[in-house]
Image: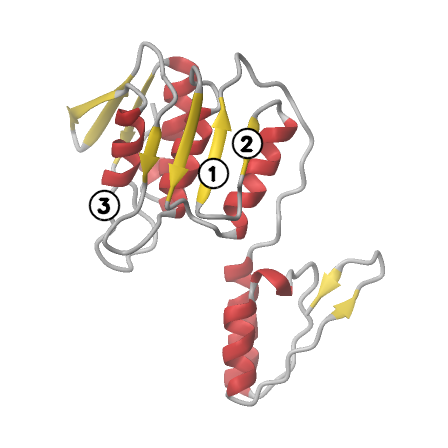
């Protein structure tokens, strides 16, 4: 169970739903809180898990209960009125790792965070291909194991510092910053006259 007092603090908390259902057969989770940037339903998350055999219902107190005796691979379209969903892709992809058979996610999110999650799961023994493209294929495995993995830098945090420097006419050096993950914000900053350069850190780490 993911408690409301924890889930309400960060939108990404909804990402525990798929792994819990796959590993434990049941997840009870509150509607996620976090960044309020408009209407953000979780219907795509539930649609994907339902396609693999899960059932869900309102559990009272604003909680949603999702259960599955077993998950089976399926072809799942995850497109919505606002395009693909990063967290729905993460939830379905994670759950599909332990499903029986193959799962194909069409209209999957292509963001770097999905690629990083897939790479991490593959290190744990998952069989995921196509990450970074609109079609991800997951071959279910019986179990996952431990692994070591370094999470990619937070591009939203880095972009915030970049914008702050541009607005104030100042200068900032951001360590461990993947500019190849931030081409949209970098392009727009350069269009308005900001200077963005790629540097190499002491350990060969990319900085901006």
Which residue lies under the disc numbered 3? Answer: 41
Question: Which quadrant would the N terminus be assigned to in this image?
Answer: top left
Residue shown at 25% from the left, 33% from the top: 47
Q: Nearer the viewer, mark 1 or mark 3?
A: 1
Image height of 143 relative to 58, above or below: above
Image height of 1 relative to 196, above or below: above
Q: State the residue in front, 106 or 142.
A: 106
Q: Is residue 167 left or right of residue 2?
A: right
Image height of 161 relative to 11, above or below: below
Q: Is residue 82 left or right of residue 170?
A: left
Q: Is residue 198 left or right of residue 145?
A: right
Label 2 neighbourhood size at 10 Å, few (<14), some (14-19), many (20+)?
Answer: many
Residue 128's disc number: 2
N-term mark: 1 or 3: 3
Image height of 124 relative to 182, above or below: above
Mark 2–mark 1 CB contact (< 8 Å):
yes
Q: Secondary structure at mark 2?
A: strand
Which residue lies under the disc numbered 1? Answer: 136
N-term mark: 3 or 2: 3
Q: Secondary structure at mark 1?
A: strand
Residue shown at 57% from the left, 64% from the top: 158
Give me the C-alpha separation between circle 1 and circle 3: 22 Å
Q: Secondary structure at mark 3?
A: loop
Residue shown at 23% from the left, 39% from the top: 43
Give me the C-alpha separation between circle 3 and circle 2: 26 Å
User: Which residue is situated farthest in the top direction here?
Assistant: 69
Q: Nearer the viewer, mark 3 or mark 2?
A: 2
């Amino acid at each position: 169970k993911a408690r409301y007092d924890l889930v309400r603090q960060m939108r990404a908390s909804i990402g525990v739903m798929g792994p819990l259902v796959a590993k434990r057969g049941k997840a009870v989770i509150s509607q996620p809180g976090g960044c309020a940037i408009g209407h953000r339903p979780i219907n795509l998350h539930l649609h994907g898990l339902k396609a693999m055999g899960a059932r869900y219902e309102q559990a009272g107190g604003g909680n949603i209960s999702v259960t599955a005796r077993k998950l089976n691979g399926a072809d799942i379209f995850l497109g919505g009125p606002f395009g693909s969903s990063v967290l729905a892709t993460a939830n379905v992809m994670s759950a599909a790792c332990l499903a029986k058979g193959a799962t194909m996610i069409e209209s999957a999110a292509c963001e770097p965070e999905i690629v990083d999650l897939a790479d991490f799961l593959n290190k744990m023994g998952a069989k995921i291909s196509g990450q970074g493209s609109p079609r991800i294929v997951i071959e279910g495995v019986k179990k996952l194991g431990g692994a070591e993995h370094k999470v990619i830098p937070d591009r939203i945090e880095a972009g915030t510092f970049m914008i702050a420097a541009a607005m104030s006419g100042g200068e900032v050096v951001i360590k461990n910053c993947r500019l190849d993950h931030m081409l949209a914000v970098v392009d727009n900053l350069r269009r308005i006259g900001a200077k963005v350069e790629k540097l190499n850190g002491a350990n060969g780490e990319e900085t901006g």
